Each structure stands twice: as structure tokens, then as C-alpha cells.
Amino acid sequence: MLGVYIHVPFCRTRCPYCDFVSEAVHGCPPDAYVEALVREIEAHEGDTESGSVFLGGGTPSLLSTGQLARIFEALYARFLLNSEAEITLEANPDDLRPELPGQWRALGINRISLGVQSLGDRVLRYLGRRHDADTALRAIGMVGEVFENWNMDLIIGAAPVDAWADTLKQSAALRPPHVAAYGLTYEPDTPFGARAGEAVEEDASLEMYRDAESALSGWDHYEISNFALPNRQCRHNLVYWHNEEYAGFGTGAYSFLNGVRARNSVSTRTYLDNPCRKEESLPLTDTEIRLETVIQHLRLKSGLERKYYATRFGRSLDEDFGLSLVRLVNRGLVEDDGLAIRPTAQGFYLNNEIGMELVG
Ligand code: SF4
């Protein structure tokens, strides 16, 4: 089943480390953007059966309840969402007000992903976030009262690093159903790019990653950066990690449909002029799709079953990747029990090396 992604490219202010497609806006995103999304959703052709919807950004929690209702009206008219469908809204802690979680739930949203990043005020200031730790804790309380399924995002490697242990301790005590912990990057085209010298050393970053694994040992570390309580894995992201099809709507959104990877314009102005126009469209060869499927599956603890590969592609995994797999096993990055290949603990952390070996 298809994953559906809706991009909302607006934030109250821009965080200095962020290179996502978004721009600052006062108040709610413009109605014109919502109408463009609706036009693009209505024009979707092909598969309509979907098991997940993800509203990401940017900051989707800036949308008014009326704007969200308009988007969901279009989604429910165009897509067939089964009763089990996971419907996620990304929210920033500073947007939470007590009445919002109930309103979001009434629209069919059943999962909230909160951009907490840290529970230390000094770290949040370093990151240039708009919220402080108290605001994040209040937001978690409001979300947790209404939603059984929610995620908190954390950032690994932000200064001061000695606050990390306390953030992990507090986070684990909150029993979030899902935690996503990604490393801080100093992207060249962001204000943080000029501060790349502040990045923590590789060893310290690895230690912080291992600290997260220990603090969250009661959670299933099912993907390199993701931890879940039972049945709380992010179904939408599993679509990407399984290299299955998804339809993306909005500025800069990617789609992968019928073997073609396409992207909308990264300029909201251009997108508004013609929301149905793909700026890039790249048909992938069968070989590329098979390669990406293996690379993506090896981000997951569960890895890739030979039977799954044979059923999906009508070919044998060993025929296509045998030599690389032997080398990966010899390097200790992948383990192979004959039925499936899986990343080792080392392969989890050095995942890009797995990709490089497979690409050859
Ligand atoms: S709120 Fe999120 S998307 Fe917006 S600028 Fe900050 S990190 Fe980027």
C-alpha cells in the first residue's frame, strides 16, 4: 500500500541548523498553499489504497484546524485509507495549545511526532529552537493525554554534550511510544555551516549514540535512528525503508510511483503556479530499484529476507549481490543466517559503508 506524504514548507522562524524546504511565516500558512495541495491531491492518478499519511515539514502544526480539515477532505476523497492507517502530524512543542490535540484527533490524525530535540534549555538555545524544556514537557503532556501513539525527535551531538544523559533519562521516564534520534549535521548552506568546527568528534558522537541505545534498551531499536515500543514502529517510514511506493504532495515533495522517482519544485512560488508539475522525474532501472531495496532494508534491524527478495523481484539475492554480501559479512557489518541478511551493531552505526560496498 502506498504511503502519502504532505509537505508543509512553513515555520515560525528558521532554525539555524535546518536545511529542510521551508520558509518563515507569520501566523498560519497561506490558504493559497492549502488550495494548491488540494489541487495536487485531486489530480493524483493511479493507486489510491494507502496505509499511511504523514504531514511533515516545515511545521504542519502551524496549519489551522480549518486548513487541516480542507486537506483531509481532499485526502479522504482521493485515497482509500484502511481502518488501520497511520496518520501522523508533525508538531512543534511551541504550537501546542490544550484544545489542539482533541481537534487533530477528530480529523482522523492518530499519531503526533513532536520536535522536542532536547530536554535541556542550554542545548535548545544552542540549536536556536523557539521552545524551552518546560514547553516541551507541557506539549508532551497534552499530546499524551489524547494520543496513544506519538514520537519524540531528539538530536544527538548538540552542545553542551554533558546535557545528553539527562535528556535521555527524562525521555525514557516519559515512556514515549517512539523515539527518533538523529545526529546534528552542520550543512554548508545553513548558518550552522560556518560553525562546522563546533561539531563533536566522531568518537564522542558514537558514545552518545551508544548512550541512547542503553537508555532506550526497553525499546526496540528497529532502525538505525529509531526506537519503538511494541507495535509502535513508524509505518510510514517503513514504506521508505522497504523501498515501496509513495506519493508526495507539496513544495519539494518526492514521489516514487511506477518505478519513477519525481520531485516537485523546491520553490513554493513555482509550486503555487502549477502544483501538478514535477520539476524532476527520474525513471529508475530494475537494477537501481533492487539495489536501493537492499540498501534501505539494511537500515532495519530485521534486514532483508532472501524469500522476500525472490518473491518481489523474481531473482536471487545472491545472484545479484553475492560478492558484496560476502565482503560485508567478512568486514563484520552484516550477518547472514542463510535465510536473511541483517546489519550488525557495527553495521548499524557505519551504515553508509554498507551502501558504498553495495554500490561498488
Ligand atoms: S522547525 Fe523544523 S523544519 Fe522548521 S526550521 Fe526548525 S528544524 Fe527546520
Image: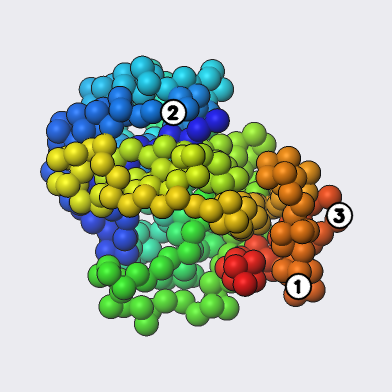
Judged by depth in the image, the label closer to the viewer, 2 or 1, is: 2
SS assignment at label 2? loop
Identify residue for label 1: 327
Front one among 85 and 166: 85
Considering only order in the chain, which callout, 1 or 3, is on the residue closer to the N terminus?
1
**Residue 287 vertical position relative to residue 350 in the rendered view, above or below:** above
Cα distance in 3D space between marks 3 and 2: 37 Å
Identify residue for label 3: 338
Q: How many marks?
A: 3
Horizontal side of residue 299 vs 145, given as left or right: right
Identify residue for label 2: 46
Q: Residue furthest bottom?
A: 197
In contact (CB < 8 Å): disc 3 and disc 1: no
Q: Residue at x 36, y 17 (%)?
A: 77
Judged by depth in the image, the label closer to the viewer, 3 or 2, is: 2
Coordinates of residue 98 in the picture (x, y in percent): 32, 28
Kind of residue sitting beneath label 1: Arg
Kind of residue sitting beneath label 3: Gly
Cα distance in 3D space between marks 2 and 1: 40 Å
